[in-house]
Image (cartoon, grey):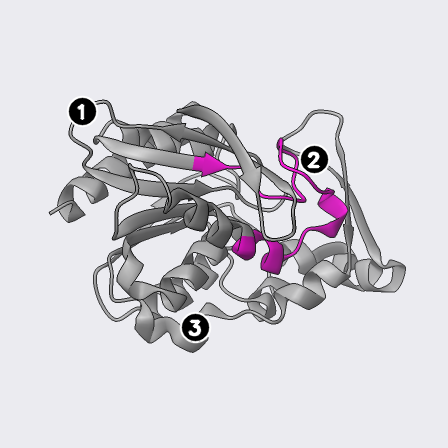
Amino acid sequence: MGKIHFKNRKGQRIVALVDRSQKNQQGLVFVTHGLGGYKEQDHIKTFADAFKEEGFTVVRFDATNAFGESDGKYENATTTNYFEDLEDVISWSSTQDWYTEPFWLAGHSLGGLSIILFAEKFPDKVKAIAPISTVVSGKLSLESPKYKKNEILKIWKENGWRIEKSTSRQRAIKKLKWSHMEDRLKYDVLNNIDKLTMPVLLIVGDQDDSTPLEHQQILFDAISRKKELHLIKNAPHTFQEMEHLAEIKEIFRNWIDKNKS
């Protein structure tokens, strides 16, 4: 189908890419980016390509209030709007002839948090999930090395804004309201972790200071079964190096092969 667009529950335009399996569809997966990301990022494309090569129909989309083609402004981004957009993309997809259940979910960072929340809410709809470098809870986010250094949180809260250069869009300046963190603090996937009975793939870079290994280990230990945790050496929060992307793709393909049946 290629690029498509439709409205979310708020009447905002969401833009998605639908890559349909050309032969016998082996499954359906939804892939979602992290805070301020977009569907064409290298790591998002890597997740998608791993599934495409395994015969899946792949849906990846730009959340609203991000840096992609969907409506909204980054400054208004919240965990709630990312999660609701995921729900709305899946709802739209359910009207299409290629839609099947149970489907797979893959997401990075805040997108990882969103897919866990969805899997906990609708476990019967989900075959397996891959929350990569995932946010686990708002509380743990406050404790991450990234936010602890240089009094970032204190300045952000006092000023009401966090301003930084984008690492994914050249020359872009990211301005985010403190209300983003207030919203994130409402969420903790550990509260309903018993709902994750499906296979779970966790991957994190050993240089990740946003969602570090320690956070992923807490999540991994809380999941009762069917789980994997992989550490990518010398990799930051957002994977960009070709060697890291190649390693991640191989991990994905092996995991998909093990859990397709």
Q: Which mark is residue 166?
A: 2
Coordinates of residue 184 in the picture (x, y in percent): 62, 64
The residue under label 3 is 190
| Rendering coords of residue 17 (x, y %) | 45, 29
Name which residue type carries label 1.
Answer: Lys
Say if the magenta span includes residue 232.
no
Q: Are marks 2 and 1 in contact (CB under 8 Å)?
A: no
Check disc 1: other Cα within 10 Å, few if <14, some if 14-19, many if 20+.
Answer: few
- Residue located beneath label 1 in the image: 23
Q: What's the residue type where badge 3 is placed?
A: Leu
Disc on the earlier residue, 3 or 1: 1
Dot placed on the residue nearer the N-terminal end, 2 or 3: 2
- What residue type is disc 2 on? Ser
* Most foreground residue, 228 or 116: 116
On residue 204, the disc is none
Q: Which residues are magenta?
A: 60-84
Q: Secondary structure at mark 1?
A: loop
Secondary structure beneath label 2: loop
